[in-house]
Image (cartoon, rainbow, N blue to C red):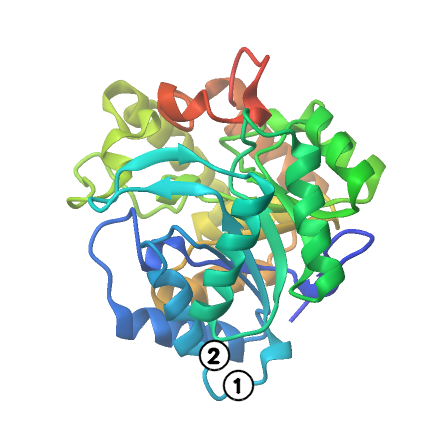
Amino acid sequence: MKTRTLGSTGPRVSALGLGCMGMSDLYGPTNEAESIATLQAALDAGITLLDTGDFYGMGANELLIRDALRGRARERAHISVKFGALRGPKGDWLGYDTRPVAVKNFLAYTLRRLGTDYVDVYRPARVDPNVPIEDTVGAISDLVKAGYVRHVGLSEASADTLRRAHKVHPVADLQIEYSLFSRGIESDILPACKELGVAVTAYGVLSRGLLSGHWSKERSGAQGDFRNYSPRFQGDNLERNLKLVEALRGIAESKGVTVAQVAIAWVLSRGENIIPLVGARRRDRLTEALGALQVELTAEDLARIERAVPPEAVAGERYDKHQMAMLDSERGRSTSA
């Protein structure tokens, strides 16, 4: 397994991480046995970075990871946990809470569910507009000093917020969406990360399956799949975006690889400080994603990809208007592409 450093202050981790959300939530029906088998297959393949959130399935995802790690050396996995999202009994979203007292409360429950005495990276899932980022990061810093957390992370933060947080405690990585379909971070957030020595753990590298090469106009999400409401999966937007995928397919086939592998390899090519998170829920999809590590993209390949999928050609925002308004990383932008 190839490795990369999680920022200037973080550990060496696998060059690909596994995003575990879909195993418990938001993508329709789940299969616990297959999820655990996929997690264990990822660990066996050398993936060390596992990303979760305490609100994924209202704690179910953390319990899933605990079960997958049972009997394995804890230090072989780097567990990244997001916190702060508030949910109701029906799974509805109630807002965010990143007050210092809430930070410590959330972590206490996370440690119990994971069956561990520390997490490797702890981060607010979103920047809480009601709590100064300095206060939130200060609380995580206290947990680092106490030994319950190894490293501080952020998620969907702007360059300004990242700089403010970094002054309180070194930030190991910024988790943020980055793919051929979502390139808004290239103007100011990526340069800020490089300046500060902060890694980027990129989620959505396959744009929630849209860039996988496995989606079609006829396919629709199951009940409980939030892609049923995602702008990029709707009507004319979907049709336009799938045309871009087909253009990418031609490049992939010329190299004897899959669309998903080219899309992941493109993110890998953007810098040694970038670690893609793949959201594989099944072992076959995991195997396909791992194959991206062997894809070598030449300068000519990259130029062809840029021509096939120009940023301005992507149709639709990455979230609906309500969710977009919650993203500190998108404030002041005219487009999310």
Dots 2, 1 in contact, CB < 8 A: yes
Up-down relation of residue 264 to residue 211 (above or below): below
Q: Amino acid at mark 1?
A: Arg
Query: In the rendered image, which residue does mark 2 sit on?
Result: 69
Q: Judge whether residue 262 can be spotted in this image.
A: no
| Alpha carbons under labels 2 and 1: distance apart | 5 Å
Residue 322 appears in which quarter of the rendering?
top left
Q: Is residue 146 left or right of residue 38?
A: right
User: How far across and down, in percent of the image, does residue 21 sit?
Assistant: 39, 54
Question: Which residue is depicted at the point 66% across and 50% down?
Answer: 140
Question: Which residue is depicted at the point 39% across and 32% down?
Answer: 95
Q: Residues within 10 Å of mark 1 (few under 14, many from 20)?
A: few
Q: Residue furthest front?
A: 101
Query: In the rendered image, which residue does mark 1 sit on?
Result: 72
Q: How many marks?
A: 2
Q: Residues within 10 Å of mark 2 (few under 14, many from 20)?
A: some
Q: Which secondary structure lies at badge 1?
A: loop
User: How far across and down, in percent of the image, does residue 26 sit?
Assistant: 29, 46
Q: Which secondary structure lies at badge 2?
A: helix
The foreground one among 141 and 212 is 141
Up-down relation of residue 337 to residue 249 (above or below): above
Q: Is residue 90 left or right of residue 200?
A: left
Q: Judge whether residue 28 can be spotted in this image.
A: yes
Residue 325 appears in which quarter of the rendering?
top left
Question: Which residue is depicted at the point 44% across and 62% down?
Answer: 288
Question: Which residue is depicted at the point 43% across and 65% down?
Answer: 286
User: How far across and down, in percent of the image, does residue 186 sit?
Assistant: 67, 28
